[in-house]
Image (cartoon, helix red, strand yellow):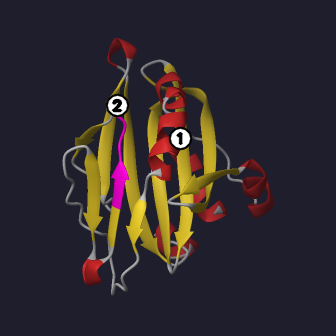
């Protein structure tokens, strides 16, 4: 987890953590009935419309894939969405049909229920909170959502799946 967490920390200008430091910051959560790790990180400086930036990321290892659920935006808005994110992750349903996946999974969402279908029939479904609006996923992500808060503040949510350990540190850095 430390490699992925440190990439996310870099986005909000935080120093890297050792594997032990990252593990100490993990909060256990339930993702589709099994364990995941939630990391809640806040910048030390104003980054977004005069406020600190916050990233909440959940990492979930399933078979040979690492699933990354990332919520990013202004501190207050993202903090207000931590519990809805955890609830949405509890509703995930994975169709564990064998898949020959070599890249990102294409998203094919349905109203009020997000669905992602990848190669070989692998599928992911989840219930999203009413306040999350579906949008185009960012690069390498299979789904994307936005949240609009008070005063027009915005936060983004992305769902990404990566092979194995996320490809390792060197390919991610490159």
**The quarter of the displayed image where residue 131 is located:** top left
Secondary structure mostly taken by the magenta-highlighted segment of the chain = strand
Where is mark 1, residue-wise? 55
The picture places residue 150, in percent across and down from the top left corner, at 38, 14
The picture places residue 118, in percent across and down from the top left corner, at 28, 74
Where is mark 2, residue-wise? 147
Vertical placement of 62 versus 126: above or below?
A: below
Q: Which residues are magenta?
A: 125-129
First along the sequence among labels 2 and 1:
1
Q: Which mark is residue 6?
A: none
Pointer 2 with pointer 1, Cβ within 8 A? no
Dot 1 lies on which element? Answer: strand
Question: Which residue is depicted at the point 47% across and 18% down?
Answer: 50
**The quarter of the displayed image where residue 37 is located:** bottom right
Vertical placement of 164 versus 52: above or below?
A: below
Question: Which residue is depicted at the point 63% across and 63% down?
Answer: 1
Circle 2 or circle 1, nearest the eye: 2
């Amino acid at each position: 987890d430390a490699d992925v967490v440190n990439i996310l920390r870099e986005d909000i200008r935080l120093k890297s953590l050792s594997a032990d430091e990252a593990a100490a910051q993990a909060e256990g959560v339930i993702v589709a009935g099994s364990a995941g790790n939630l990391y809640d990180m806040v910048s030390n400086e104003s980054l977004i419309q005069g406020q600190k930036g916050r990233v909440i990321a959940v990492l979930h290892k399933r078979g040979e894939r690492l699933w990354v659920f990332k919520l990013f935006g202004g501190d207050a808005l993202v903090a207000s969405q931590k519990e809805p994110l955890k609830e949405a992750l509890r509703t995930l349903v994975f169709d564990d049909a064998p898949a020959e996946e070599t890249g990102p999974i294409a998203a094919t969402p349905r109203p009020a229920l997000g669905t992602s279908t990848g190669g070989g029939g692998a599928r992911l479904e989840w219930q999203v909170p009413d306040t999350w609006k579906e949008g185009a996923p960012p690069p390498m992500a299979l789904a994307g959502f936005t949240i609009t808060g008070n005063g027009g503040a915005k936060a983004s949510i992305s769902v990404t799946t990566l092979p194995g350990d996320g490809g390792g540190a060197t390919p991610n850095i490159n």
